Amino acid sequence: MPEPTKISSRVDLGNIQFLKSAANLSHCPDDTGLEVAFCGRSNAGKSSAINYLTGQNKLARTSKTPGRTQLINFFTVSDDFRLVDLPGYGYAKVPTAMKRDWHENIDNYLRNRLSLTGLVLLMDIRHPLKAFDHTMINWCAQAQMPLHILLTKCDKLKRGAQQATLLKVKRELADQQATTIQLFSSTHDTGQKLLLNQLSEWVSQGHRADLAARQDTNFSADITSID
Ligand code: GDP
């Protein structure tokens, strides 16, 4: 196993800054320290979550034009910790060629990025566990990648329905190792602390990837099946 990287265990997003956008793996910043990547279907609330967590309204762009943003965006939290905004997925009208590019870039990033230490998957609480979500969840299981799931926009449901969905999703994923799930709302101040605790835990564990588990994974064999 690689040596853990020793970095501060407390995650403070107060000084987060945009670092760069990358169209593919070769344009990503140096693969040092640790990274946590945020992923999800387009419109799941990923940009809103990043902006809310960091207290910066315009750090990540919200409500993008469907299918236009295919870049991987990197944000520096500290010298040795970054947040990564992976391009969203799920617009039915996106041309197949663009889906293929997206697939190739994400597959490359997920399989080869040594600093990637955990994935945060965002799902709209009203539409959880779509095909894309299962693809990511299955990939995490195969690759032994720690996964933290946010059921976003939970303010859209009443408290009882929120808890019922949380329980249902937890039950469906009961067999998944290293997977945690929580409620989240960027607009109603729900779940920030839990998420920060999870990021801190990953950072304090400090594991850079042992890529062996990932090499044979392919996170989606059939892109046309992803809605
Ligand atoms: P992205 O495509 O995943 O980056 O999604 P965005 O962050 O752009 O959000 C998509 C839409 O959902 C926007 O209209 C947001 O205002 C809305 N939204 C995001 N988070 C929340 C939330 O916590 N509660 C509610 N009610 N709406 C949200």
Image (cartoon, rainbow, N blue to C red):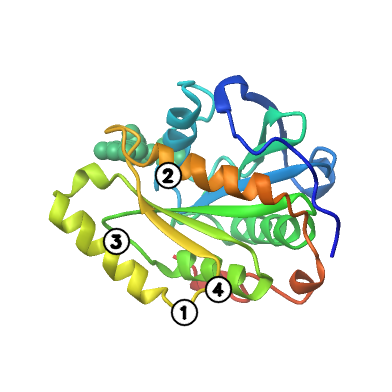
Question: Which residue type carries mark 3?
Answer: Leu
Q: Residues within 10 Å of mark 2 (few under 14, many from 20)?
A: some
Quadrant position of the N terminus in the picture:
bottom right
Amino acid carrying mark 2 in the image: Leu
Q: Quadrant of ligand 1?
A: top left
**Numbered tag placed on residue 175 in the rendering:** 1
Check disc 3 and report its element: helix, strand or loop. Answer: helix
| Location of residue 144 with respect to 202 vertically, above or below | below
Left or right, residue 31 beside residue 191: right
Q: Disc 4 to disc 3, how far (Cα)?
A: 19 Å
| Closer to the eye: label 2 or 4 | 2
- Residue 227 is situated, as x and y percent measured from the top left of the image, at 44, 65
Q: Which numbered marker is on residue 194?
A: 2
- Amino acid at dot 1: Asp
> Where is 76 relative to 198, above or below?
above
Instruction: Compute the Cα span from label 3 to label 1.
Output: 15 Å
Q: Which mark's residue is nearer the viewer, 4 or 3? A: 3
Q: Earlier in the sequence, mark 1 or mark 2?
A: 1
Q: Is the residue 138 above or below the residue 132 in the image?
A: below
Q: Is mark 4 within 8 Å of ligand 1?
A: no
Mark positioned earlier in the residue sequence (3 or 1): 3
Label 4 sits on residue: 138
- Whether residue 34 is visible here, answered yes or no, is yes
Nearest to N terminus: mark 2 or mark 4: 4
Q: Measure the alpha-carbon separation of dots 1 and 2.
A: 22 Å
Q: Left or right of 145: which side holds 152?
A: left
At 36% from the left edge and 75% from the top edge, which residue is drawn? Answer: 172
Q: CA distance from mark 3 to mark 2?
A: 14 Å
Which is closer to the viewer, label 3 or label 2? Answer: 2
Q: Identify residue for label 3.
A: 166
Point out residue 136 in the picture as x, y percentages from the top left corner.
55, 65
Q: CA distance from mark 2 to mark 4?
A: 23 Å
